[in-house]
Amino acid sequence: MNRRILMLAGALSAALAIGPAQAQTTLDLKIGAMPLNTWWYVAGGAIANLVQPTLPSGAKIEVLARGGGIANPVVANENKAQIAFTNVATAAWAWMGEEEIYKGKKHQDIRSLVGGINPIWVVAMLREDYIKKTGNDTLEKALADKSLRIIMKPAGSSVPPVARMVLQSHGQSIDTYKQDGRLIQVDAAQTTSMLRDGRADLYFESAPRGHPAVTELTLTVDMRFIDYPQKALDTLARNGLKVVSMPALYKGQNGPTKTVDLGTSILANKNLPDDIAYLVTKTVVENKADLVKAHQAFNDFTPEDAWKPENNGIPLHPGAERYYKERGWIKTTQ
């Protein structure tokens, strides 16, 4: 832990001390993550371990073993977790009150701390057997097929909203697939067997580097990653997703795949004290090596890009903004 963080902790402890006797603070922080053994839960624990020694005496941090990219902005907005992992895109959707997910309710009591932690690509894959049978080797051709069967995760995942937007960009509705019985929504653990058995043709999935479900699928079923058409990319970009090329990481990719990145970021309730927001931001940005030891996903983190708007999706917390300005990454106006 570097000296500047410890100095900040001393100042913060003095500022938050209760009464003339410097009594212990009752500051309790909760970090919204995901269930046990997920990468966000592991990452939350690693960050908590780094931050805890720098907090005022008596302050506590708890990592919540529940939540996810869509739920966590709501939890933070309601201050049930003061800090939370989320997707860059879902943070933006929550802020805007995206109709399908957040029913038009804007969640604007959230602010971002650290963005661009790792890419989470949302990909489309076709079974090779389907391509051989139909000749439909692009997403546009497949979506024109009235018998196409789609498989993806259930509602609550960040994947269905992306798929819905892709379909809308082609003048289609996900409800039509549901009504026709051509949409299957199951947990990732069930997807491989269903595709292996030929019960679906097109698969939408989130695929960070080394995703176990995607790795298992592509090693046991012949799948082909396909590019999103430009009109789909344009629609997704308008809805806060980052258009990128996913490098060739999996069997079934003939090269980089044109897709979008949900991204991972850390946000906070707007009322999190500025000094705490500053401390958490500083800790994450300046301890990448320790975080990589906890989880390899941090290898993709570029600390000097953590402040950039495209890596956060929502406004920065003032405490985080102060840190980035001190580093000279955000230029202050004269």
Image: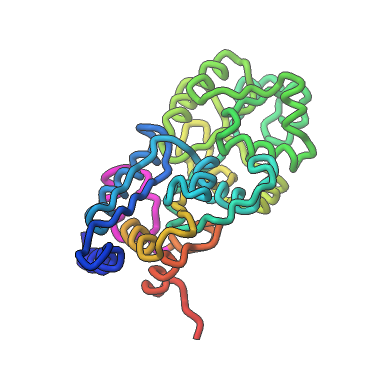
Q: Is residue 269 visible?
A: yes
Q: Residue at x 60, y 49 (%)?
A: 94
Magenta residues span 285-304
Residue 289 showing in the rendered view: no
Left or right: 17, with 240 as reference point: left
Q: Is residue 157 left or right of residue 55?
A: right
- In the picture, residue 145 is in which quadrant? top right
Residue 159: x, y in percent? 58, 36
The residue furthest front is: 20
Tell me what residue is drawn at x 72 percent, y 24 percent: 178
The quarter of the picture where the N terminus appears is bottom left
- Tell me, yes or no, whether the highlighted magenta stretch contains residue 309: no
Find out whether residue 299 is within the magenta segment. Answer: yes
User: Quadrant location of residue 249?
Assistant: top left
Q: In the depicted view, which residue is nearer to us: 39 or 31? A: 31
Task: Name above or below for residue 15 compared with residue 138.
Answer: below
- Residue 13 horizontal/vertical position (percent): 26, 64
Percent position of residue 99, x then y: 70, 44
Give above or below for 79 relative to 139: below
Main SS, magenta region, reads helix
* Left or right: 206, with 266 as reference point: right
Q: Is residue 258 left or right of residue 25?
A: right
Give the residue displayed 27% in from the left and 62% down from the top.
Answer: 18
- Is 326 placed above or below 240 here? below
Vertical arrangement, residue 294 with respect to residue 217, above or below:
below
